[in-house]
Amino acid sequence: MSLLAMLVAAAAPAVLGDPAQEARARALDAEIRCVQCENEPIAQSTADIAVDMRRLVRERIVAGDSDAEIRDYFRQRYGDFVLFRPPWDARTWALWLAPLALLLIGLLTIFAARDRTRAGAGLQPEESER
């Protein structure tokens, strides 16, 4: 049992003394993606690199970096993929607008189908057979 406790203690980052700083660190840990696991935030990942990334987040907070500076640091080092919410810029506009475009296309398709159904309902029986 003590081996398990040592493993958990080794994987957990040092808790910051200031509760506000620790809250910032935990929020950032949830926003930054583990580059090894790819679909897990570093807060949940047990990969060695995620442990290093959590430690680095806390070091940068203690050094006085803002949340934006910390995100930018990881973004510069690992690319936009490391952030669960990529920034809005010329390279990512399609990523942000794609759900809206798909919704609009779907609604237009539904309305077009309804209009065709209504137009077909007004025909006489012998006209609809043509």
Image (cartoon, grey):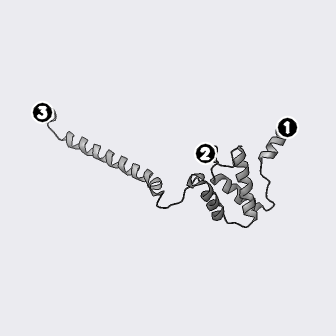
Figure label count = 3
Instruction: Identify the secondary structure beneath mark 3.
Output: helix
Q: Amino acid at mark 2?
A: Glu
Question: Looking at the image, is 41 positioned above or below residue 63?
Answer: above
x, y percentage for residue 92?
48, 56
The residue pinned by badge 2 equals: 38
Disc 2: CA contacts within 10 A as few (<14), some (14-19) or many (>=20)? some
**Outermost residue toward the right?**
2
**Outermost residue toward the left?**
126
Distance of mark 1 from mark 2, alpha carbons?
A: 28 Å
Disc 3: CA contacts within 10 A as few (<14), some (14-19) or many (>=20)? few
Residue drawn at 37 percent across, 51 percent down: 104
Residue drawn at 15 percent across, 32 percent down: 129
The residue pinned by badge 3 equals: 126
- Residue 34 falls left or right of residue 85: right
Instruction: Identify the secondary structure beneath mark 1.
Output: helix
Q: Is residue 20 visible?
A: no
Disc 1: CA contacts within 10 A as few (<14), some (14-19) or many (>=20)? few
The residue pinned by badge 1 equals: 3
Q: Earlier in the sequence, mark 1 or mark 2?
A: 1
Distance of mark 1 from mark 3, alpha carbons?
A: 83 Å
Determine contact: label 2, label 3, CB under 8 Å. no
Could you tell me which quadrant the N terminus lies in? top right
Residue drawn at 70 percent across, 66 percent down: 65
Q: Earlier in the sequence, mark 2 or mark 3?
A: 2
Q: Amino acid at mark 3?
A: Glu
- Residue 27 falls left or right of residue 96: right
Could you tell me which quadrant the C terminus lies in? top left
x, y percentage for residue 77?
62, 56
Q: Is residue 11 visible?
A: yes
Distance of mark 2 from mark 3, alpha carbons?
A: 60 Å
Of residues 91 and 61, which is closer to you in this image?
A: 91
